[in-house]
Image (cartoon, rainbow, N blue to C red):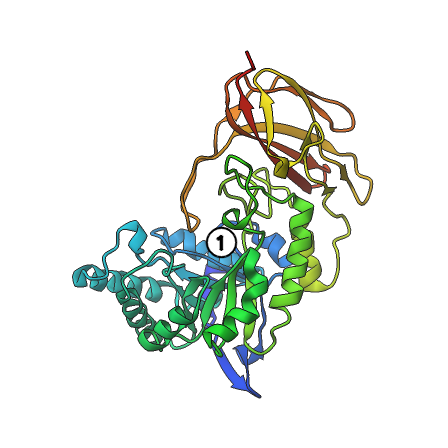
């Protein structure tokens, strides 16, 4: 089937994508038809479900070296009526790339040219993303000279698809630099999380009047969330996140019909980033969460027939995450998280504890899932957990996942500290 789809894709012409300005605003046109990006970030997520939920596009971060894998992804997207914003991995200063090294910059440009040539004619391609968050902890403005070189190269190799670079936030100084050093960009990508509501003000203050796509947005980030007394970030529960998704999309993304060309919610899949649940819209075991239902409602105006369970914040002995819960080693406790299913499906509860992440990485760099710890626990029929605190003093996080048996789930967690017993 893949071979047939490949041949079918090859037989079709590349999409013709344009950004046009009229009446003081911008529109994205795909093959002459208006196109608002209803997208999600994903390299390997469930594209069939994305299409079924009302999404129309997916973004990636790198083409990598697996040409067959990228072509299969493009074919799969095309079969499902999805476009792909193709991410091109560009060297970052914080990873050691030196933009004063002319030879390295030239070699990178050569490699990216080869990548563009590989995929430019696939009908699923929507646009090109030059790097990702190249402004994060950067100091050498020559990175933007390289972005301009890459943009011009893409325009020469592929005149059918626009080019952007996604930014980790922005301000007037950054926008002024982009205007001066990378003027060939067709639009910019904006990546904001808890501060997405400030986007209209940021656009005014930075004097960015051109088109943009919100290339990452989602829950409140771990770097901007409340902290416990020992510095552990407090994660919202799955239902709270879904409500924030709706509010942020309606108030900010959908509200800008002049410059905004759509968005990519983060992340259509799962990943470890401070916790295994913080950014993914799916659990590691594949179940969709309330945020997926929220995106379907935002994209289509309709809720799914069977929705994910709802959940409230988890507590230990009635205390929540912002209470900075401290337990004595080996002591007994009770944890709860009220959960309900809209259709009355019976719920299955899973409680587990992990050591608190010690990662200090930024920008989505890879992290390892912390080790699971033994709790000596039991769960009653209402999902209440009775457990014994770990014997080893330290920082931990208690998780609960609630499944409806129909492919949907909700989750919550609460960080806690274990101290040695008083003597």
Q: Nearer the viewer, residue 61 or 30?
A: 61
Of all residues, the one furthest to the bottom in this rendering is 23
Give the image quarter of residue 270.
Answer: top right
Residue 308 place in picture, x, y as percent: 72, 45
**Residue 20 place in picture, x, y as percent:** 51, 83
> Which residue occupies the foreground of this view, 311 or 335?
335
What's the residue at 62%, 45% (across, down)?
236
As drawn, 212 above or below 414: below
Is 39 left, or right, of 160 in this rendering? right
Reply above or below: 223 against 376.
below
Note whether 180 is above or below 294 in the view shown: below
Which residue in the rendered view is the most extreme toward the right? Answer: 344
Q: Quadrant of the C terminus?
A: top right
Q: Secondary structure at mark 1?
A: helix
User: Along the line of sight, which residue is nearer the eye, 169 or 182?
Assistant: 169
- In the image, is 381 to the left or to the right of 106? right
Residue nearest the viewer, comparing 188 with 269: 188
Q: Which residue is mark 1?
A: 2
> Is residue 54 in view?
no
- Where in the figure is residue 128, as x and y percent of width and height? 41, 67
What residue is drawn where x is 64% and y is 45%? 288
Identity of the residue furthest to the front in this view: 423
x 33%, y 77%: residue: 180
Q: Residues within 10 Å of mark 1 (few under 14, many from 20)?
A: few
Q: Position of residue 202 (x, y in %)?
A: 51, 69
Asked if residue 216 can be seen in this view, the reply is: yes
């Amino acid at each position: 089937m893949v071979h047939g789809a490949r041949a079918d894709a090859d037989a079709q012409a590349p999409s013709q994508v344009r950004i046009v300005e009229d009446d003081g605003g911008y529109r994205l046109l795909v093959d002459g038809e208006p196109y608002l990006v209803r997208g999600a970030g994903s390299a390997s997520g469930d594209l069939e479900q994305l299409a079924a939920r009302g999404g129309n596009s997916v973004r990636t971060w790198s083409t990598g070296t697996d040409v067959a894998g990228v072509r299969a992804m493009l074919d799969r997207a095309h079969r499902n009526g999805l476009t792909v914003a193709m991410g091109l991995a560009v060297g970052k200063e914080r990873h050691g790339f030196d933009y004063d090294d002319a030879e390295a910059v030239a070699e990178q440009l050569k490699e990216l040219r080869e990548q563009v040539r590989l995929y430019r004619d696939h009908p699923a391609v929507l646009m090109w993303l030059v790097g990702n968050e190249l402004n994060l902890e950067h100091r050498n403005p020559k990175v933007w000279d390289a972005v301009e070189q890459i943009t011009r190269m893409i325009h020469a190799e592929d005149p059918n698809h626009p080019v952007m670079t996604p930014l980790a936030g922005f301000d007037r100084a950054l926008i002024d630099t982009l205007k001066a050093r990378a003027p060939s960009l067709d639009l910019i990508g904006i990546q904001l999380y808890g501060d997405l509501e400030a986007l209209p003000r940021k656009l005014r203050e930075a004097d960015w009047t051109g088109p943009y796509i919100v290339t990452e947005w989602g829950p409140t980030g771990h770097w901007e969330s409340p902290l416990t007394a020992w510095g552990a970030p407090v994660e919202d529960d799955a239902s709270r996140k879904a409500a924030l998704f709706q509010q942020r999309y309606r108030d900010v993304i959908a509200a800008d019909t002049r410059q905004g060309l759509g968005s990519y919610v983060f992340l259509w899949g799962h990943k470890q980033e401070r916790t295994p649940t913080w950014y993914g819209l799916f659990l590691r075991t594949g179940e969709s969460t309330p945020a997926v239902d929220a995106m379907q409602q935002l994209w289509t105006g309709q809720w799914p027939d069977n929705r994910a369970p709802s959940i409230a914040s988890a507590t230990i002995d009635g205390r929540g995450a912002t209470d900075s819960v401290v337990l004595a080693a080996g002591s007994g406790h009770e944890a709860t998280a009220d959960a309900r299913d809209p259709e009355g499906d019976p719920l299955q509860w899973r409680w587990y504890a992990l050591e608190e992440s010690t990662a200090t990485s930024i920008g989505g760099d890879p992290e390892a899932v912390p080790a699971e710890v033994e709790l000596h626990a039991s769960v009653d029929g209402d999902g209440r957990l009775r457990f014994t605190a770990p014997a080893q003093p330290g920082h931990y996080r208690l998780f609960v996942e609630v499944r409806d048996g129909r492919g949907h789930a909700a989750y919550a967690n609460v960080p806690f500290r274990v101290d040695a017993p008083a003597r």
